[in-house]
Image: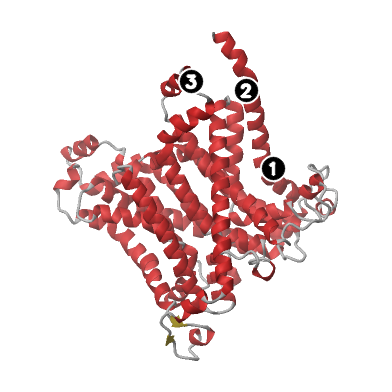
Amino acid sequence: MTPMTRRTTWTPWLYLAPALVVLGGLLVYPIYQLGLISLFRYTQAQVSGGEPTAFEGFGNYSVLFGDPQFWQVLLATVVFAAACVVSTLAVGCALAVLLTRVRAVPRLALMLAALGAWATPAVTGSTVWLFLFDPDFGPVNRVLGLGDHSWTYGRWSAFFLVLLEVVWCSFPFVMVTVYAGIRAVPAEVLEAASLDGASQWRIWRSVLAPMLRPILVVVTIQSVIWDFKVFTQIYVMTNGGGIAGQNLVLNVYAYQQAFASSQYGLGSAIGIVMLLILLVVTLGYLRLLRRQGEEL
Amino acid sequence: MNLLRGLVARPWRFAAEASALLIAAVVAFPLYWMVLSAFKPAGEIESSEPRPWTLSPSLDSFRRVFGQQDFGRYFVNSLVVAGSVVIASALVAFLAATAVTRFRFRFRTTLLIMFLVAQMVPVEALTIPMFFQMRDFGLLNSLGSLILPHIAFSLPFAIWMLRGFVKAVPEALEEAAYMDGASRGRFLWQILFPLVFPGLVATSVFSFISAWNDFLFAKSFIISDTSQSTLPMALLVFYKPDEPDWGGVMAASTVMTIPVLVFFVLVQRRLVSGLGGAVKD
């Protein structure tokens, strides 16, 4: 109970008003619109007013679910996001532990390098990585002796290249957060464990991991959300979804359907599918928080 | 005992420090290569024997970038968008965070959960309805169509993160202020705001980055008036998939990355402590 509480109860709502207006108008309302558009036949003809909008019910959804490409894209999205999340978490946690083992200078070097990668805008990160792996002028192929092997030609190697860039720019968040978490663990606990003869791996598994669980949950969920929605990297690095759409993920697929093919209704239906998948992830997250007894 | 432990520990620490430095070099390498390539003369960039140094740095690529129609204008546009988003979302988030941390009221928990859920919304999916909304507002082809959505999208995370900072200000301070006859507004802006300011800075990093990096909205909402373009679009002018002008792309990338790097380095300590606080809370 704070002193402010005793006063009138409408004050918090006054403070909240700007936020609620903005979120209501520019987040809730567009979500409602997204759902609405997904139920209509909405193409270029309707946008320009040449034809009236026609209610289609779940027509867009049945077109979508009947299209084998959709299932292929959905599968690719899930596998790609999972690979990104696992790699990001593994690299981030390993480097966070490494940071605690070294003295100030190497630590600062690694921190600064990571901050640099973190700060790099997605568009520039994508073009720089493409250049590094360029078949004609890139240094990577020279060093690996791959000649003019094109990384973006094959489906898996293109996904792999995007994965490298995504991990590069998203591991710093995990590393910095987990490192801050490890630093908050009292030194005596770790000392006691190592005096009892616990191995490094054992200390990590039985002492650190449980204490870091809340932090690990947060970074995992954030990574899932970010990696599931990757757009810029795929769009720039595979030039809009790869050869014949082999590197499409849901986000880029929705964009292509809506803005390249003017199938706004279909694109919105894909958006709703994404929204529902992420909602399920969020609800799972909230349940985890509840179980940990976190107070909001 | 100590001596023994020191001997055993030292080779391990040496290995750890060597690998930390090596990894730092690998992580920094793409950025190094970007800046290096931006300064290389044309002949060295498009060479089949790329070297990790250059003996004849040149500003040709930068000249080409800034000579490209209105690049400076795109830079200013990007700054205006990111700046407006940072300031507006910081103020709105500060008020909202104060409301949810320093008051108890009905639906408080519900609201907090809503803010959390709102963070998960894939904003990219909202491009389609937003496109029509911006068209109805008459904002297509203007910077407003980039500023408004980004304020909305950065708010939930900003509120969530600021909570910890507002909570950390002792309640006794608030009581003392009222005892001394301060009004609520005075307490809010002259006492609470300066105390929470470091947190606002840390939070701003995220809104700055999301607005500065924005590619999808710029691509979708700025459709015909190129004078309203932002940097990501300008960068892609040099990047034609068949025949990219790598020197130009790397120089433009350097120009686009440096403001964010500067911003990050300035706030990095607050960022780390802020993240720790936000996550622990």
- Residue B107, percent across and down? 23, 56
Q: Are marks 3 and 2 in contact (CB under 8 Å)?
A: no
Please give the chain letter of the residue carrying mark 2. Answer: B
Q: Which residue is mark 1?
A: B29
Q: Residues within 10 Å of mark 2 (few under 14, many from 20)?
A: few
At mark 1, the secondary structure is helix
- Residue B170, percent across and down? 26, 36
State whether discs 2 and 1 lie on one chain.
yes
State which quarter of the image contains the C terminus of chain B. top left
Please give the chain letter of the residue carrying mark 3. Answer: A
Please report the residue visible at 18 percent of the width from the left and 42 percent of the height from the top: A1
- Residue A21, percent across and down? 32, 64
Amino acid type, callout 2 = Trp
Q: Which residue is mark 3?
A: A194
Q: Residues within 10 Å of mark 3 (few under 14, many from 20)?
A: some
Total labels: the figure holds 3
Please give the chain letter of the residue carrying mark 1. Answer: B
CA–CA distance in space, label 2 to label 1 = 25 Å
> Mark 3 or mark 1, which is nearer to you?
3
CA–CA distance in space, label 3 to label 2 = 16 Å
Q: Earlier in the sequence, mark 2 or mark 1?
A: 2
CA–CA distance in space, label 3 to label 1 = 36 Å
Pick the residue in front: B222 or A231: A231
Q: Are marks 2 and 1 in contact (CB under 8 Å)?
A: no
> Mark 2 or mark 1, which is nearer to you?
2
Q: Which residue is mark 2?
A: B12
Does A273 sit above or below residue A93? below
